[in-house]
Image (cartoon, helix red, strand yellow):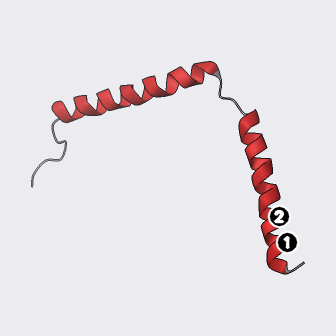
């Protein structure tokens, strides 16, 4: 068996193991709801900061 075939076989074995690990991992149910809420909260905060920028704290010379 040439080296390249062994190399591909090792990648295939690793990919299968990673797929099995990924399907076994399920995020916690509340984490699914928390991420979008946190994301939209950050978007809202960013929009508020753009709407009402604070004064520049640097004094002109």
Mark 2: give few (<14), some (14-19) or many (20+) Cα within 10 Å. few
Nearest the eye: 53 or 36: 36
Most extreme residue toward the left, as rendered?
61
**Relative to residue 27, is residue 34 drawn left or right?**
left
Q: Residue at x 75, y 54 (%)?
A: 15
Per the rendering, the mark at residue 10 is 2
**Relative to residue 29, is residue 13 drawn left or right?**
right
- The spot of residue 52 in percent (x, y) is 17, 30
Placement of 15 over or under 19, stated as above or below = below
- Give the image quarter of residue 20: top right
- Give the image quarter of residue 29: top right
Placement of 5 over or under 41, stated as above or below = below
- Give the image quarter of residue 45: top left
Most extreme residue toward the front, as rendered?
1
Q: Which residue is mark 1?
A: 6
**Relative to residue 8, is residue 30 drawn left or right?**
left
Q: Is residue 52 visible?
A: no
* Disc 2 to disc 1: CB gap under 8 Å: yes
Q: Is residue 13 visible?
A: yes
- The spot of residue 34 in percent (x, y) is 51, 22
Q: Residue at x 20, y 35 (%)?
A: 50
Identify the secondary structure beneath mark 2.
helix
Q: Residue at x 82, y 65 (%)?
A: 9
């Amino acid at each position: 068996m040439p080296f390249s075939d062994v190399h591909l076989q090792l990648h295939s074995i690793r990919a299968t193991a990673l797929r099995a690990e990924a399907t076994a991992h399920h995020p916690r149910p509340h984490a699914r709801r928390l991420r979008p809420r946190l994301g939209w909260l950050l978007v809202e905060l960013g929009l508020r900061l753009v709407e009402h920028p604070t004064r520049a704290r640097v004094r002109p010379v």
